[in-house]
Image (cartoon, grey):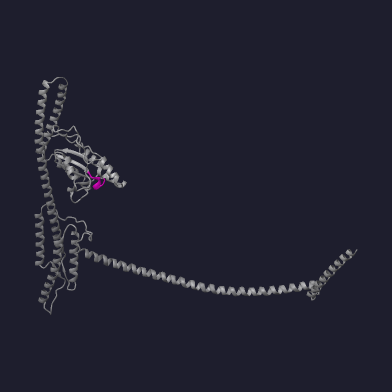
């Protein structure tokens, strides 16, 4: 019972404490809301305050917006003004730039014109091939000998002297008087005229003395320019050199140039004739030597044949058969020696007989370039070997070799047909032409020449060189040197008693000399 009372006492104490706390909270709430007579009235009051505050903030915001709009409009207006100023400045700058560019173009054009004029004048005095773009000279005369040119030069000079003597080389536009004296005026005019003519003649003589193949057109321009300059100097006194005198000076220049060219052509022709005579003499001596050697071979074969026939009459069995074979061989060799001797004798007697060859050197001159020439050598390959000496890096390849009883005429006919295809249009004796094998074959058919052409050039050394360069390997070069020795061993079948056979390079068919 005591325990129950104790528990109730504790509960009552707890309730008292809780009640005291609630009372305090109630008093605090009453104190906080003591001014509110009615909730509805308080809500209306708070709503009115909120609307008033919102209206004030809206008004402030509108004011701020209007102010910002005003400031922005002012800034935009300022920016538009600045943009307009920049556009105007750009237009002004473009106009100024265009005007400046146009002015620079005009200045450049004038400066370029002045430069070209001065450069043209300077080149008239220069004679360096690297500085002069010389023009192509067209001959004005067609004389056959230097004497005809010399005679014409003398005639032109006599005409010049006549003009000087008659006072027609230069003329005055007006008659001058000095101190009221016409005679003194005439003396002054003659002296001034002599001065101008001496200056002009000096320039012309210098041009004639220096004229050559690479400056003849420039020298003509130089005389023309001297004529203009001298006449400009005489402009104050109204004196000028006549056009007729100028034309005579230019004619003299051309004659002197063509005279020197004619001398050069004659010298080249004489050199060619001397070379031809040397070739003919060399071919004649070579043919005579071969003829003498073949006669000795014939004698040796005849003796061997006679000896074999005597032995044949005494032999029997296998020895008899062997001697028959030997006799046939000796008869064939004897006939070859006689044929070779007849050909050598004919070549020695016929100076025009020879071979026309077509050869190429791809490594030295490239594809499509052929040398078309002739030789009177008994073995024309000797001529090809001579051409393949140290003067060219690679040997020549033979594309055709045709025998002719008039080799010079056949050579000239082929070269003349392809004259416009010559590599050197100035010196046709170089004999190199840019043609094709097909064109050469077509020409041979048109002329009725039965010549066999080899289309592909072997060019062995050149092609091996290209291969070696492509591989860039030194051991490969050693392998090639072993695989392709420079000298092949002689065959065991070759003996002193058997002459070498004739070369098989002649065109088909070959008409042997008899």
Is residue 78 in view?
yes
Q: Is residue 364 magenta?
A: yes
Q: Residue 361 or 148: which is nearer the viewer?
A: 361
Residue drawn at x 56%, y 73% as measured from the top left: 73
Q: Quadrant of residue 280?
A: top left
Q: Residue 22 or 142: which is nearer the viewer?
A: 22
Q: In this view, which residue lies farthest toward the top?
A: 316
Q: Is residue 399 magenta?
A: no
Q: Position of residue 199 (x, y in %)?
A: 14, 68
Q: Quadrant of residue 435?
A: top left
Q: Position of residue 262 (x, y in %)?
A: 13, 54
Quarter holding the C terminus is top left
Q: Residue 267 or 338: which is nearer the viewer?
A: 338
Q: How many marks?
A: 0
Answer above or below: position of 185 versus 209: below
Left or right of 97? Residue 423 is left
Q: In this view, which residue lies farthest toward the right?
A: 1
Query: For the magenta stretch, what is the residue range?
Result: 360-367
Q: Position of residue 124 (x, y in %)?
A: 20, 63
Q: Position of residue 234 (x, y in %)?
A: 17, 71
Q: Quadrant of residue 110?
A: bottom left
Answer above or below: position of 360 versus 204: above
Is residue 459 in view?
no
Residue drawn at x 31%, y 46% as measured from the top left: 471
Q: In this view, which residue lies farthest toward the front?
A: 2
Quarter holding the N terminus is bottom right
Q: Residue 78 or 157: which is nearer the viewer?
A: 78
């Amino acid at each position: 019972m005591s325990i129950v009372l104790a528990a109730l006492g504790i509960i009552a104490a707890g309730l008292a404490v809780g009640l005291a706390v609630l009372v305090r909270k109630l008093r605090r709430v009453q104190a906080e809301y003591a001014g509110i007579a009615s909730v509805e009235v308080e809500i209306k009051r708070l709503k009115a305050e909120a609307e008033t505050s919102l209206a004030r903030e809206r008004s402030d915001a509108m004011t701020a917006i209007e102010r910002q709009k005003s400031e922005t409009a002012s800034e935009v207006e300022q920016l538009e003004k600045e943009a307009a100023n920049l556009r105007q400045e750009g237009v002004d700058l473009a106009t100024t730039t265009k005007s400046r560019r146009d002015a620079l173009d005009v200045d450049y054009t004038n400066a370029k014109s002045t430069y070209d004029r001065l450069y043209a004048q300077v080149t008239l005095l220069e004679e360096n091939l690297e500085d002069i773009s010389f023009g192509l000279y067209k001959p004005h005369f067609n004389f056959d000998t230097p004497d005809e040119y010399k005679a014409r030069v003398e005639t032109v000079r006599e005409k010049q002297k006549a003009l000087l003597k008659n006072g027609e080389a230069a003329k005055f536009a007006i008659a001058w008087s000095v101190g009221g004296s016409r005679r003194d005026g005439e003396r002054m005019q003659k002296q001034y005229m002599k001065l101008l003519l001496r200056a002009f003649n000096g320039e012309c003589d210098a041009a004639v003395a220096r004229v050559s193949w690479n400056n003849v057109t420039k020298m003509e321009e130089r005389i023309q320019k001297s004529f203009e300059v001298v006449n400009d100097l005489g402009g104050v006194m109204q004196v000028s050199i006549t056009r007729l005198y100028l034309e005579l000076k230019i004619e003299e220049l051309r004659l002197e140039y063509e005279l020197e060219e004619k001398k050069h052509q004659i010298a080249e022709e004489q050199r060619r004739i001397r070379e031809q005579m040397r070739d003919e003499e060399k071919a004649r001596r070579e043919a005579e030597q071969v003829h003498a050697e073949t006669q000795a071979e014939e004698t040796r074969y005849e003796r061997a044949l006679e000896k074999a026939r005597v032995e044949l009459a005494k032999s029997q069995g296998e020895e008899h058969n062997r001697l028959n074979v030997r006799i046939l061989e000796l008869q064939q060799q004897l006939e070859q020696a006689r044929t070779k001797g007849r050909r050598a004798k004919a070549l020695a007697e016929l100076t025009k007989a020879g071979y026309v060859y077509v050869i190429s050197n791809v490594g030295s001159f490239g594809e499509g370039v052929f040398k078309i020439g002739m030789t009177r050598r008994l073995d024309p390959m000797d001529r090809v070997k001579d051409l393949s000496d140290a003067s060219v890096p690679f040997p020549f390849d033979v594309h055709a070799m045709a025998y002719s009883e008039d080799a010079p005429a056949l050579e000239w006919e082929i070269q003349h047909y392809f004259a416009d295809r010559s590599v050197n249009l100035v010196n046709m004796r170089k004999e190199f032409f840019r043609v094709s094998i097909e064109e050469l074959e077509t020409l041979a058919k048109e002329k009725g020449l039965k010549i066999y052409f080899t289309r592909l050039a072997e060019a062995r050394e050149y092609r091996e060189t290209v291969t070696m360069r492509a591989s860039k390997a030194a051991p490969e070069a050693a392998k090639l040197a072993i695989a392709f020795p420079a000298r092949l061993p002689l065959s065991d079948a070759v003996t002193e008693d058997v002459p070498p056979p004739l070369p098989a390079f002649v065109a088909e068919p070959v008409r042997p000399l008899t």
